[in-house]
Amino acid sequence: MTHDQQTVCRRRLRQLQTQLEPAGVDAFLLHTGPSLRYYCGFTGDSSYLVVRPGEAVFCTDGRYTTQAAGELPPEIEIRLLTPGNGLARQLAAFAPRRLGVEEQSLPVARSRQLQQEISGLEIVFCQQRITAPRQRKDAGELQEIRRAVAVAEEAYRAARPLLRPGISEREIALELEYQMKRRGAERTAFDLIVASGYRAALPHGLAADKPLAPGDPVTIDFGACCRGYHSDQTCTLFLGEPDREQRQVYEVLFQAQQTGMAAAQTGMAAKELDRTVREVINQAGYGEFFSHGTGHGVGLEIHEAPSISAASDQQLAAGMVFTVEPGCYFPHRWGIRLEDMVVLEEDGARRLTTLDKRLDQAIVD
Ligand code: CO
């Protein structure tokens, strides 16, 4: 880990420590990969960071001690977890009464075990407090996200010439994955979606053995994960001329996306952005076929805050990175989705993804 990255982690940790008192806890227990990477630079898993006033202690097992020593700022103490000296024992040494956790992914069994082994321990839900700072990306994070976008787009350009009738969705997905990894992605950002023809009506239709057929719309939802940061983008292509209805829906979705990206601004309620995008599709008469939210934050996780949906209570702020991805799905027939990533700046949203999604670019002949 570079000196700069260590400095960034120290600053984030100090900031998190100021949250101990307002949360009313003696310590935060961080265990998710994104949190560990964000707060101490660790890139492995199966480990814990105990954040207390004035110190942070890292607990891991024998598989990760060498790696942690190379990645963490040197002042963070590394303790070895062994079968006889597990997390509960290590934690008990601090005699915490109230422990703040990332409740959405801490296994219930683990939580119960901690309470059984540390008498009187109260588990406090602190996920929101721990993850909130990640919503607004700093310059270093934006650079990593741009790289994840570039790697995915280069892979897409390399794989696109394979699109023709007869090739299977799975082969397209494999080629995309191969091309991303060749370009330095540690993995794909999620299981790639290549859904053609009637399968394009499945918003999350994972690539299957179905061969592409002439006239098929093909939805390709893809992204790369580079140094922990994700990208996410969806193109819909047509193998041959789209019919009149497909053209119309495509243009409506394109317009909805443009409208959304132009409307996004700091201080806006996320649900208001969702409403703005949805309104374009409603006006065109296709509202009932847009069956999911408008977008989601992207960063160390592929889906993270803020959620851009009717249920969201979040406000947009500078530095947020999120998707704008309206889609329409006609069960058993076909579907179209267009997705871009933007970063919100003081004067509005700037597109991070760069592929040209105008309809004439989407026709493969
Ligand atoms: Co997405």
Image: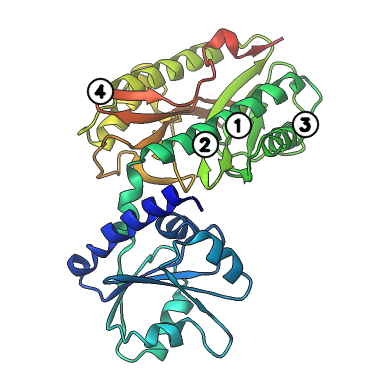
Q: CA distance from mark 4 to mark 2?
A: 23 Å
Dot 1 amino acid type: Val
Does 289 sit left or right of 217 as displayed? left
Name the mark on residue 168.
3
Does 29 sit left or right of 189 as displayed? left
Pointer 2 and pointer 1: residues touching (CB < 8 Å)?
yes
* Residue with the mark numbered 1: 151
Does 129 sit left or right of 243 as displayed? left
Nearest to the observer: residue 254 or residue 152: 152
Which circle's residue, 2 or 1, is located before the other in the chain?
Answer: 1
Task: Report the residue at 32% width, 42% height from top.
Answer: 136
Which is in the foreground here, disc 3 or disc 2? 2
* Residue with the mark numbered 4: 347
Q: CA distance from mark 4 to mark 1?
A: 27 Å
Quarter of the image where one finds residue 65: bottom right
* Residue with the mark numbered 2: 231
Which circle's residue, 3 or 1, is located before the other in the chain?
Answer: 1
Q: Residues within 10 Å of mark 1 (few under 14, many from 20)?
A: many
Residue 265 pos. (x, y %)? 25, 27
Residue at disc 1, secondary structure: helix
Dot 2 amino acid type: Ser
Residue at disc 2, secondary structure: loop
